[in-house]
Amino acid sequence: MKNAIAHQTALLFISSMLLIACGKSGSVGVNSANNPTATSNAANAIPIGIAFAQTSNVALLGQEGTDGVKIAQKYFNDKGGINGKLIKLIFQDTGGDEVGAVNAFQSLINQNKVVGIIGPTLSQQAFSVDPIAERNQVPVIGASNTAKGIPEIGDYVARVSSSVAVVAPYAVKAALKQNPQIKRVAVFYAQNDAFNKSETEIFQKTVKDLGLNLVTVQKFQTTDTDFQTQASSAINLKPDLAIISGLAVDGGNLVKQLRELGYKGLIIGGNGFNTSHIFSVCRALCDGVIIAQAYSPEYQSEINTAFRKAYVEQYHREPPQVSAQAFAALQVYVEALQSLDKKSKISNLTLPQLRTALNKELLKGTYQTPLGEIAFTPVGEVIQKEFYVAQLKMEANGVNGKFAFLNVK
């Protein structure tokens, strides 16, 4: 009997030690209400959540965001992180729908105990998950969310991705500069995506404000692959310009089918076209597509030069807009945390206190990013000075291409 009791006692002791060890390993590097001294060794790393799509038809866009934050993590950690504390990125896959994004945000907030979040990939997802961050008082910075109304979701919601209302009109003006004879315009948009619905409203308003004739508005889904009906209907109306609000795969296939059916006019792609992954979709038929952008690899600044160099060395191509915006989002967190820590050691704050203080601090700053100088309005909308327009130029092999930046000023 004594042996049995001794055996049970030993098991209980071992179990207790394992539980204590597990509890210590769960430290996030900032104080929590129940763990006021969790600030030593590897636990010093400050966790920031990354909620990008790693699967689904949105994965190509999500990967570009992931590329950007990884480069930013190395860049800022090599410079000492947050006054000696490293940044630790915690990734959760949002997939391409709202359910995936909700699961990602809940895991980052409740399980991973992050101090802030970058994401999600799509504006459609942001309208579902940003309110979750708001209720939990966790800062969230959108790096690829440009639909109208996102910063207004709550006090803890900001974005470094400029509103489509600011960016989209540049593309239409660039098209008119190339062909002043444009009169008739056909518009296409993905009706199941909040961003594309918001973007097409801006495009349609711009077309009307410029005195052009909007001859048709064609709808599709981001999951569609066959656009023959919409393309044929539009071509029959003889448009001089086609404007497409979609993502890379669906939008690229629509471009391809428009060209295959004989459309010869200019094509404008919306923000969803801001990725080199579109080259593999419409290939040689991508040539000539016009896209307004919030980033240019050619922008002259110390940090953009460093970002561009690191990106090209790692991925062997020019950095796309979403990667630059994701870099900028992490930069905002890093510089806001550095500022906070200089005022009062962040290791002395509980996690809820740090989240609140960080949210207030990041909105105050001005940041010299790869996008140029940015700041925020009181509601979290990005203030950006520089915008660009690029035209896709495909090489003779029809496989490789580049964004050739146009002079539209």
Image (spheres, rainbow, N blue to C red):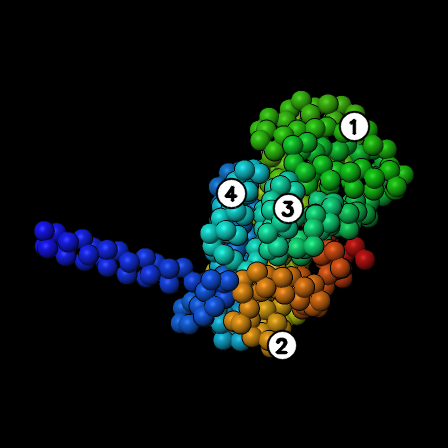
Tag 3: amino acid: Pro
Instruction: Report x, y in % for residue 281.
Output: 56, 38
Tag 4: amino acid: Asn
Tag 2: amino acid: Lys
Q: Which residue is mark 4?
A: 103
Local crowd size for mark 4, using a 10 Å CA cut-off: few (<14), some (14–19), many (≥20): some
Classify mark 4: helix, strand or loop: helix
In the drawing, what numbered circle is on residue 343? 2
Q: Which residue is mark 3?
A: 131
Label 1 and label 3: CA atoms lie apart by 36 Å
Classify mark 2: helix, strand or loop: helix
In the image, 2 versus 126, the foreground residue is 2
Label 4 and label 1: CA atoms lie apart by 39 Å
Disc on the earlier residue, 3 or 2: 3
Q: In front: mark 4 or mark 1?
A: 4
Disc on the earlier residue, 1 or 3: 3
